[in-house]
Image (cartoon, rainbow, N blue to C red):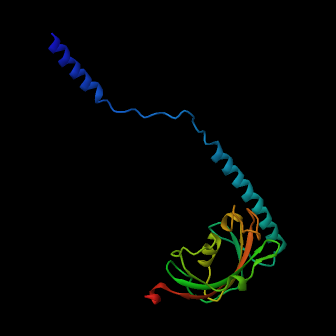
Amino acid sequence: MKAKFIFLSFILLGIFSCKNPEARRPIKHKSGSYISKSVERNKAIFEKQEKQIVSILEKNKQQPYYFSDTGFWYYYNSKDTLQAPKPSIGDKVIFEYDVKDLNGNTIYTKDEIGLQNYWVDQSNQDLISGIRDGIKLMKEGETVTFLFPSHKAYGYYGIKNKLGTNVPIQCTITLNSINQKNENN
């Protein structure tokens, strides 16, 4: 009898010890309210900046402005009327640009920044997303002025001692040359 009890105990112990561990449930449940508030705050910031930029466009009606697919406005200071190619992925472009606030106050001059060498969509160069997107719209020799909302510019961080947070900017870019990828090989 004692042997049966020990045998039965081992069998029961074996069955219950093979049980999979249960996942522990969190004590607090996050509702996602922080993300919802952040989305609403960013929408409000964008709407305010969009109104600022649209008021600039309305004041300067003699200049034809274009709206990009990626969320900024621009106009051509000098435009290439020929069928020259635009840069594509992997092309090396050489350009210069300046940075101003929407009131025209200079933040960085072309001389302070200097000539920039950039491999389109393949470089980890420290360029704001607006400039990276804007360059793809240009042809060699063109000069274009871009109006960037803060999310396409310096965003939440701004520029220390030069530009506050969430400030829209304008950049005038001159695309000096395009070295196409197949020419580089």
Q: Residue furthest top?
A: 1
Q: Residue furthest front?
A: 2
Query: In the rendered view of the protein, which quadrant contains the C terminus?
Result: bottom left
- 65 w.r.t. 185: above or below: above
Residue 110: x and y, percent?
Answer: 71, 84
- 103 w.r.t. 10: above or below: below
Q: Residue at x 63, y 85 (%)?
A: 95
**Which residue is at the front of the view, 149 or 123?**
123
Can residue 97 be seen in the rendering of this structure?
yes
Quarter-wise, where is residue 130 in the image?
bottom right
Residue 181: x and y, percent?
Answer: 47, 84
Quarter-wise, where is residue 6 in the image?
top left
Q: Residue at x 76, y 68 (%)?
A: 163
- 103 w.r.t. 165: above or below: below
Query: In the rendered view of the protein, which quadrant contains the N terminus?
Result: top left
Quarter-wise, where is residue 57 in the image?
bottom right
**Which residue is at the front of the view, 24 or 176?**
24
Residue 69: x and y, percent?
Answer: 62, 68
**Which residue is at the front of the view, 70 or 170?**
170
Residue 82: x and y, percent?
Answer: 61, 90
